[in-house]
Image (cartoon, rainbow, N blue to C red):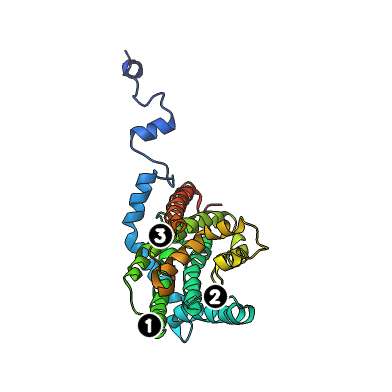
Amino acid sequence: MSETTHDSAVAMSAPPSSDEGLTPAQRAQKYGLSQSGARPSLPQYIRELWDRRHFISAFASAKLTAQYSQAKLGQLWQVATPLLNALVYYFIFGVLIGTRDGIKDFVLFLVTGVFIFTFTQNSVMAGTRSIAGNLGLVRALHFPRACLPVSFCIMQLQQLLFSMGVLVLIMLAKGQMPMWSWLLAVPVLALQFVFNTGLAMIMARLGSKTPDLAQLMPFIMRTWLYASGVMFSIDNIANKADIPGWVQPVLEYNPAAIFIDLMRYSLIESFTDDRLPAHLWAGAGWALLLGVVGFVYFWKAEERYGRG
């Protein structure tokens, strides 16, 4: 028998390969291979996000420092900007329109509303641009894309903490002494942060697909501002005879108005009661709903960010 014939006989008698008949997906699974850029499972995604917590914190701090690096007053603008907004609203709404009538401690009422709404407004605006505005980073490095909207929300929280320090000084200057209810500000801010982050993640996904959305958001946020009782009392508006009955519950259950009122009840003595109005605890529901829905909605498109 020739050598060629012998080799052919051996080949014919050899057992078939164990990979024979497997699809590419089955073969990849057998050898522990995974698709590059594939979306991880939700538990794995949460673990990866937690592993990047130091990056998230450093990125937020760096962005906050760089934001005012070109201004002579530097990070003083973190506090000056919302204070100037409050001054403008006080003049227009409090003095010219007269919305301060019937509101005790209108200055504290207004400043608290401006600071708390600005926290949500800036978080949503930054979240909308978090993916579309950082495509170079998204395309160059592998990391959970949720790091970006979370980082921007942490950045806005850091800014708010500066503003809250100024608010405390204003309250002391107005003669208000510290109260135990001030401690409630911590869980209120925690709930608002979860709500803001969930909403920012929703807007980050929408903004990554439609960058022009960032141009529309200022108009939406301004409308939301005027409907959230920042510079007027929702109760005073709802008690007017020409206002339909459905307006008051819609305004009261507006999540921005809920977080603003929670903070007012926590900090301002004239707004502190033996118990909080029952509807305000809907803030926890809003935080849970938007936090979960926003995170899952963002995760669903993880593999598509930065492509196309």
Q: Secondary structure at mark 1?
A: helix
In the image, residue 18 above or below residue 55: above
| Residue located beneath label 3 in the image | 191
Position of 210 compared to 269: left or right?
right
| Residue located beneath label 1 in the image | 172
Residue 262, by quadrant, is bottom left
Query: CA gap, disc 2 to disc 3?
Result: 29 Å
Task: Give, as a three-letter code, the residue at label 2.
Answer: Gly
Specify the label residue 46 is tagged with. none
Label 1 or label 3, whichever lies nearer to me, is 1
Label 2 or label 3, whichever lies nearer to me, is 2
Find residue 165 and report its horizontal and vertical position in percent: 38, 78
| Residue located beneath label 2 in the image | 102
Residue 187, by quadrant, is bottom left
Looking at the image, is mark 2 or mark 3 earlier in the sequence?
Answer: 2
Q: Secondary structure at mark 3?
A: helix
